[in-house]
Amino acid sequence: MNKELEKKSEELEQTLAKQLELLKKDSEEWLKVGAVVLVAGLLTYGIVKATRKKKVNKTEKALEALEQQGLLTKDIEEKLRKPAKSSFWPTLSQRLLILGLALAKEKFLTNLLNPQPENAQAPEKGR
């Protein structure tokens, strides 16, 4: 009985060791994926921040030039300082237009290129 318990404990220790090895391998892969995602996020954040800074500098230069020339009004300043709003609807309408054109092309272009003979499969009237 004692030997059986020792065998079972050894088997359990071995399975535990195997499970820990698998966990370490899986966690290494997830760690690599997480690191790649983190680096990509930081890189994207840096690029966006750098491009926004340039845009602000260009706006400030434009405002200074207009002020020097005496053309700067409050309306112009508001329009230049206010960030441009992006909307979902223009892109949706553009996509619907492209979808409509694709459907029209598929439906009508095939009929224009391959006209059917007039007397082939003509519907019979009066029957």
Image: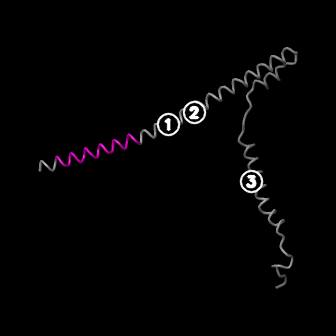
Residue 123: x %, y % from top left: 82, 79
The residue indicated by pointer 2 is: 41
Q: How far apart are labels 3 and 1 at the CA level?
A: 37 Å
Q: Residue at x 80, y 16 (%)?
A: 64
Which amino acid is tagged 1? Gly
Image vertical order of residue 80 relative to residue 118, above or below? above
Disc 2 is placed on an element classified as helix
Disc 1 is placed on an element classified as helix
User: Does the magenta portion include 23?
Assistant: yes
Residues rendered magenta in the picture: 6-25
Q: Is the residue under label 1 in contact with that under label 3 (CB below 8 Å)?
A: no
Q: How far apart are labels 2 and 3 at the CA level?
A: 33 Å
The quadrant where residue 112 appears: bottom right
Residue 44: x %, y % from top left: 61, 32
How many neighbours does mark 1 have within 10 angstroms: few (below 14), some (14-19), or many (20 or more)?
A: few
The residue indicated by pointer 1 is: 34
The residue indicated by pointer 3 is: 99
* Sooner in the amino-acid sequence: mark 3 or mark 1: 1
Image vertical order of residue 53 relative to residue 120, above or below? above
* Sooner in the amino-acid sequence: mark 2 or mark 3: 2
